[in-house]
Image: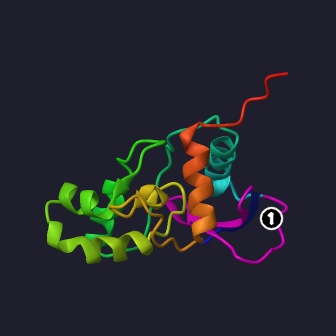
């Protein structure tokens, strides 16, 4: 399956996918050699991720092909409904899925999301507003939430 590594403001990201869709986008914790060429099946994903980081894209339009259980896919589908710049709690997400008692299973599925940023698991926070758990690191989660909030320091002079 075609793979490429790109640079992002949060570090190197690896993208995996083919003509059936993008199956994985993950942030890497170590520097990797960047891809010299981008496979055709991944070019649109790279383009959209770059546009996202340049504040030119708020919603991804990609063919996705993540591998997961039926429950995980249900959670990931629900994550895609969280609007850009908004957050929901794990409890709210469980309620939206129709089972408040499934909060731990929802949190587990959220943590196994293979499509970093595209399926916005970073938009899920604790009921108390805390940045709980994030596979890419809480500093990245905070960066993404700030990036999407639109609150940027303005230069007056």
Q: Which residues are magenta?
A: 9-37
Quarter holding residue 90: bottom left
Let me know if residue 6 is in the magenta part. Answer: no
How crowded pointer 1 is (Cα within 10 Å; few <14, some 14-19, many 20+) is rated as: few
Side of 75 where 135 appears, left or right: right
Side of 57 where 122 appears, left or right: left
The local secondary structure at tag 1 comes to loop
Q: Nearer the viewer, residue 149 or 7?
A: 149
Q: Residue at x 70, y 76 (%)?
A: 29
Image quarter hosting the C terminus: top right
Quarter holding residue 89: bottom left
Numbered-mark total: 1
Q: Residue furthest top?
A: 157
Report the colour scheme. rainbow
Residue 55: give x, y in percent of width and height: 65, 37
Q: Residue at x 54, y 41 (%)?
A: 149
Side of 26 where 83 appears, left or right: left
Image quarter hosting the N terminus: bottom right
Q: What residue would you read off at disc 1?
A: 35
Residue 86: give x, y in percent of width and height: 43, 44
Q: Residue at x 51, y 63 (%)?
A: 115
Residue 57: give x, y in percent of width and height: 59, 37
Q: Residue at x 51, y 54 (%)?
A: 118
- From what the image shows, is residue 114 above or below residue 8? below
Residue 120: give x, y in percent of width and height: 46, 55
Let me know if residue 26 is in the magenta part. Answer: yes
């Amino acid at each position: 399956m075609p793979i490429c590594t790109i640079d992002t403001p949060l570090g190197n990201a690896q993208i995996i996918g083919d003509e059936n869709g993008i199956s994985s986008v993950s942030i890497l914790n170590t520097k990797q050699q960047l891809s010299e060429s981008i496979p055709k099946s991944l070019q649109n994903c790279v383009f959209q991720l770059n546009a996202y980081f340049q504040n030119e894209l708020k919603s991804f339009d990609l063919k996705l092909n993540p591998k997961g259980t039926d429950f995980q896919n249900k959670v990931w589908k629900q994550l895609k409904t969280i609007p850009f710049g908004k957050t929901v709690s794990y409890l709210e997400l469980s309620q939206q899925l129709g089972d408040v008692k499934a909060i731990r299973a929802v949190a587990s599925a959220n943590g196994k999301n293979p499509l970093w940023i595209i399926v916005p698991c970073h938009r899920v926070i604790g009921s108390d507003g805390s940045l709980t758990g994030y596979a890419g690191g809480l500093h990245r989660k905070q960066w993404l939430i700030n990036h999407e909030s639109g609150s940027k320091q303005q230069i007056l002079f």
